[in-house]
Image (spheres, rainbow, N blue to C red):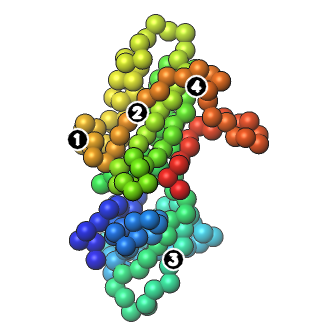
Amino acid sequence: HCSIYIGFYGSAETGVYACQSPKYSSTKIYLYPKELVQIEIVNSKIIVTNLIRKRNQLIRFNSGDLGRIVSRNENSKYGLIEVFCSERLILIGDDDLSKSDIEETMKQIDVTEWQLIIDYVSPRKTNQIVLLFRYVKSDTNMSNETLENILKSYLQKFFANQLTNLSEELTLQFEPIEFDQLIRNKTSNKLLKIIDRRF
């Protein structure tokens, strides 16, 4: 069913257990094998049990994501799950990048303020993600290039492959800005740290 896939879904605790086929490319619906994993929805939270380790004690993991089971033939070997909200911002192969990863990384970078915009390269090219880091420099003599290289080195820690080898799936962009150029909530005027424009 997933011989041709465009995305994966999983977690550090359970590994990758679902994939997305071209049929569901415009959605957040993933296909999973029922004989390998059991998925429950409890108060909208996705609870996962890995059935591969049947000889050991089975452990139910709270993925921290919200979703629902999509109705499907009960006799089917595969189930469908729709993910509404995820701590993971992007998932490329077996590597993922979460909000906490970004926040922890930016603590290490000497900037006054920052903002991350996530988008696709284009509406038709949803297999390539763009991460645009906008930042307000602090009062240092560090060049933009040096700062951006430091940020890249921190981000590299979250990926098994070199970032340069992921260019077909992930594009990193950087934009030095002034403080008044930060995007804020139009109602509350609160600074928006992470803006996901994919959905």
Q: Quadrant of the N terminus?
A: bottom left
CA–CA distance in space, label 4 to label 3:
39 Å
Task: Give the mark nearest the N terminus, 4 or 3.
Answer: 3
Which is nearer the eye, 18 or 114? 114
The 10 Å Cα crowd at callout 4, few under 14, some 14 to 19, many 20 or more, is some
Q: Nearest to the eye among marks 1 and 3: give it.
A: 1
| Residue of label 1 | 165
Q: Is residue 99 above or below residue 9?
A: above
Q: Is residue 111 above or below residue 98?
A: above
CA–CA distance in space, label 4 to label 2:
16 Å
- Identify the residue at the far bottom of this view: 75
CA–CA distance in space, label 1 to label 4:
29 Å
On residue 57, which mark appears? none
Task: Give the mark nearest the N terminus, 4 or 2.
Answer: 4
| Residue of label 4 | 113
Which type of secondary structure does the marked residue at label 1 adopt? helix
In-image side of 116 versus 17 (left or right):
right
| Residue of label 3 | 69
Q: Nearest to the eye among marks 4 and 3: give it.
A: 4
Name the amino acid type tagged 3: Ile
Would you identify the image quadrant in which residue 75 lies? bottom left
The 10 Å Cα crowd at callout 2, few under 14, some 14 to 19, many 20 or more, is few
In-image side of 183 versus 164 (left or right):
right
Name the amino acid type tagged 2: Gln
CA–CA distance in space, label 1 to label 2:
16 Å
Residue 195 position, x and y percent, is 56, 43
Name the amino acid type tagged 4: Glu
Viewer can see residue 107: no
Which type of secondary structure does the marked residue at label 4 adopt? strand
Task: Name the residue at 22% across, 41% down.
Answer: 165
